[in-house]
Image (tube, rainbow, N blue to C red):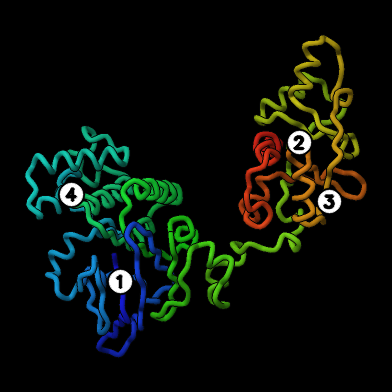
Amino acid sequence: MVKFQNVSKIYPNGTCAVRNFNLSVDKGEIIVLIGPSGCGKTTTLKMVNRLAAPTSGKILVGGKDIREENPVRLRRRIGYVIQQIGLFPHMTIAQNIGLVPKLLGANQQEIAKKVDQLLEMCALDPPLYRSRYPKQLSGGEQQRVGVLRALAADPDVILMDEPFGALDPISREQLQDELKRLQDSLQKTIIFVTHDMDEALKLADRIVLMKDGEIVQIGRPEDLIRNPANEFVREFIGEKRFIRNPEEVMVEEVMLKTPVTGNTEMGLAEALRQMQHHRVNTLLIVDKKDKFSGILTMRAVQQAIRSGNRIIAKEILEPVNETVTSQSTVLEAARKLDVSSFGFLPVIDENQRLQGLLNYACLVNTFVDVIWPNGNSENEQEGRENGCNPS
């Protein structure tokens, strides 16, 4: 859909912004350009719709050389979303969204229908929003309208230059999720510029990491994390994101240090209140010296209460055969976790004192592809239902 062939951009003062850039972007693909400031990612984006002209090389959009197209017509068929949003303040939301279709010759009825469809697509109630002005919207809502305006002419290609960079973290994450949802249904070809690696890893089908105007590495997010091309890639991605060998990671690095606990002498009513307060169905029980004694389940508490017997926690504990220490490796813990009847492991020290808890949620984000490549066992499901609850 978009193809760069040996593209370079050199300014009159001799500064080389982009050098020998080669990339083929497939139809329906999200390509994310990322790199340090001044690496050439925004210049690369602007060359696609001729806001910047390549010094050499060729860019094809839909198989056509963009140099042979009228730049105004080219821009009208390529969506463009920027960080500053760029909505016209004197125009209503409907007028902002309908601007490009109007320039392309659509009639008012067609434009109104398209505007309402797009607003509904982003959960913006048309009767409520179409007549509003940009200043009456939040930053997140304005950026949503900016994305909808880029979609209004139904372009095959959309360019997005740090579109969510000025938003607060919550709004930013919401719009990232919304973009992914829209992409699932619309399958546009998107070239997206960001400086945020978390955003790149979340959105990209492929990431293009740039430095000094050149491509350092291209690949799927997983490819960059698993096989960084050099030290620059490792440093830019950040060590915390790399999938480490589970034989080198200790339980203390990933365990929950403050699980929900109870003591051996607590009454059943107190235990039940504790579970309800923390929204869990299991308590880790310790004695007066913080030594781990066993598991108290909601089922056991409810049965004991129905029996009418006045008993305390230690009388209905379930023993735990599988435990780990904080210095156990994650690989060792994972093997024990797979046979645990509770779906989690108490972490204890050499004196049997409780130090924390390890469950599937502690491991899955970093190690699921290493330890459980299929990741779908019955024990894993049990871990999600039970093992996460004491956290």
Sequence-earlier tag: 3 or 4: 4
Q: Label 2 amino acid? A: Phe
Instruction: Tell whether 62 sits left or right of 290.
Output: left
Q: Earlier in the sequence, mark 2 or mark 4?
A: 4
Q: Which mark is residue 325?
A: 3
Q: CA distance from mark 1 to mark 3?
A: 54 Å
Q: Secondary structure at mark 1?
A: strand
For the point 43% across and 59% down, the residue is 204
Q: Say which residue label 1 marks.
A: 3
Q: Nearer the viewer, mark 2 or mark 3?
A: 2
Among the two numbered marks 1 and 3 on one chain, the one whose residue lies closer to the N terminus: 1
Name the residue that disc number 2 marks: 342
CA separation in Å, label 2 and label 3: 17 Å
Q: Nearer the viewer, mark 1 or mark 3?
A: 1
Q: Callout 3: helix, strand or loop?
A: loop
Name the element at disc 4: helix
In the rendered structure, which amino acid carries the disc numbered 3?
Answer: Thr
N-term mark: 2 or 3: 3
Left or right: where 270 falls relative to 11: right
Marks 2 and 1 sit apart, C-alpha to C-alpha, by: 53 Å
What distance separates the C-alpha of mark 2 from that of mark 4? 56 Å
Front one among 61 and 192:
61
Pointers 1 and 4 in contact (C-beta within 8 Å): no
Q: Nearer the viewer, mark 1 or mark 4?
A: 1
Q: Quadrant of the C terminus?
A: top right
Specify the farthest residue to the top. 308
**Mark 4 lies on residue:** 96
Which amino acid, by three-letter code, is at mark 4? Asn
**Mark with earlier residue (2, 1):** 1
Residue 98 rendering spot, x and y as whole percentages: 15, 48
